[in-house]
Image (spheres, rainbow, N blue to C red):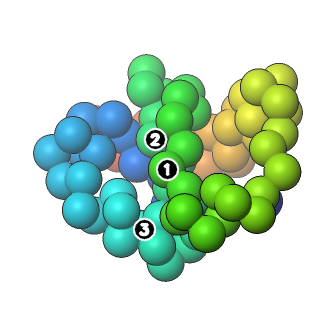
Amino acid sequence: MTFNSNSIVSISEANQNFSKVARLASENGAAIILKNNAPRYVLLEYSCFQDETFADNANVLMIGKQILEKHKRAFKELAK
């Protein structure tokens, strides 16, 4: 499964606005929730959950690190 960088949210944003995260998961098939700037949770639309073959933790962490590295400048700007 590929992830859209627009479907990545912080855990604080997920806590404050879960309906937004659910909407992202509906639109994109999944939403990634970051904790301490690292991918920690994935919210999947149920239909994707039934059909999807899950990657192991090492692959998920590797992909998350690639996304963070690719968008490092944007995340630093958002953190200000």
Of mark 3 and mark 2, the one earlier in the sequence is 3
Question: Can I make out residue 2 in this image?
Answer: no
Q: CA distance from mark 1 to mark 2?
A: 8 Å
- Horizontal arrangement in the rendering, residue 57 relative to residue 21 (left or right): right
Q: CA distance from mark 3 to mark 2?
A: 11 Å
Binning the other alpha carbons within 10 Å of mark 1 as few (below 14), some (14 to 19) or many (20 upward) gives some
Binning the other alpha carbons within 10 Å of mark 3 as few (below 14), some (14 to 19) or many (20 upward) gives many
Of mark 1 and mark 3, the one earlier in the sequence is 3
- Indicate the amino acid at tag 2: Ile
Q: Are marks 1 and 2 in contact (CB under 8 Å)?
A: yes
Element class at badge 2: strand
Q: Residue at x 46, y 73 (%)?
A: 26
x and y, in percent, of residue 23 in the image: 36, 71
Residue 38 vertical placement versus 74 (above, below): above
Q: Nearer the viewer, residue 78 or 4?
A: 4
- Res. 43 mark: 1
- Horizontal arrangement in the rendering, residue 73 relative to residue 61 (left or right): left
Q: Residue at x 75, y 35 (%)?
A: 60
Q: Which picture quadrant has residue 16?
A: top left
Which residue corresponds to mark 2? 33
Q: Which picture quadrant has residue 48?
A: bottom right
Q: Nearer the viewer, mark 1 or mark 2?
A: 1
Of mark 1 and mark 2, the one earlier in the sequence is 2
- Indicate the amino acid at tag 3: Leu
Which residue corresponds to mark 3? 24
Q: CA distance from mark 1 to mark 3?
A: 9 Å
x and y, in percent, of residue 44 in the image: 55, 56
Q: Residue at x 40, y 48 (%)?
A: 9
Q: Are marks 1 and 3 in contact (CB under 8 Å)?
A: yes
